[in-house]
Image (spheres, grey):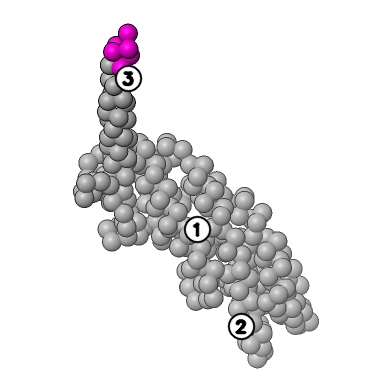
Amino acid sequence: MKKKFLYLALTAGLTFPVLQAQSQIKIGNILKQVTGKGSGTTATTGTPSALEIGMGIKEALEIGTSRGADLLSAKDGFLGNMAVKILFPPEAQKVEKTLRSIGMGKLADNVIVSLNRAAESAAKEAKPIFISAIKQMTITDATNILLGSKDAATNYFKRVTTAQLMEKFKPVITTSLANVGATKYWGQAAGQYNKIPLMKPVNTDLSEYVAQKAIDGMFIQVAQEELKIRDNLGARSSSLLQKVFGYADKNK
């Protein structure tokens, strides 16, 4: 009986490490398939799995939206970028033109600078909203984005984040407009314009206008970052991005 017990104990002791090692090998192989890492090799070709597509799209969008938010929230992020620079509201462009014609161009310039400074302040709030939208993305969403149009990711963000961005941006914009002097400059500009005989008074919800233009600017920047990942091989900074977007290239 003692010999039999000893034999079973020894057998179990030998078997358990073997099973454990086999399990570790299997787990390692799975990780290699998903990340493309291991044994000094990098998997950058072939058909990606649904999991890889989801991970690749999320990685790309997190990089792109973070970079876009950082660029726009920096000084002159809006003011120095003609694609997103905020000008006088359309219904108030006659105000700007009139002010410049009567020698008050400096006041008009102050309005434009302050509007863009407010947008730059609000842009800092965009990153966590985009990251949250990325985390909620399904495999189907990711696949549709990967194989969709060149602005498929941007359209996804417009659909799922616009309301949140407006809710977050508007109070920040309102505060920032006051802090950077936009409210004061706008009041002076509108006041001077409204004093001119026969001119129809201009009333604009400045916070609503700047918040919407800031959001529009965010999506323009996100679209540019999306194009970099899709069209620029050098922007695919990991083996996963190379594999996923390489697959998309072949299926255009």
Q: Nearer the viewer, mark 3 or mark 2?
A: 3
Is 78 displayed left or right of 47 in the figure? right
Amino acid beneath label 3: Ala
> Within the image, what quadrant is residue 248 found in?
top left
The outermost residue toward the bottom is: 103
Dot 3 or dot 2: first in sequence order is: 3
The C terminus is located in which quarter?
Answer: top left
User: Mark on residue 149?
Assistant: none
Q: Nearer the viewer, mark 1 or mark 2?
A: 1
Q: Is residue 51 above or below residue 166?
A: above
State the count of labels: 3
Judge whether residue 147 can be spotted in this image. Answer: no
The region drawn magenta spans 1-6
The spot of residue 161 in percent (x, y) is 56, 50
The reply to whether discs 1 and 3 touch (Cβ–Cβ < 8 Å) is no
Q: Is residue 144 above or below residue 222?
A: above
The N terminus is located in which quarter?
Answer: top left
Rendered residue at 40%/51% (across/down): 59
State how far apart marks 1 and 3 are (Cα).
65 Å
Query: Residue at label 3?
Result: 9
Q: Is residue 172 above or below residue 35?
A: below
Amino acid beneath label 1: Phe
Q: Secondary structure at mark 1?
A: helix
Is 74 displayed left or right of 7 in the figure? right
User: Mark on residue 109?
Assistant: 2
Pick whichever, 191 or 200, lies toward us: 191
Q: Secondary structure at mark 3?
A: helix
Query: Residue at label 1?
Result: 219
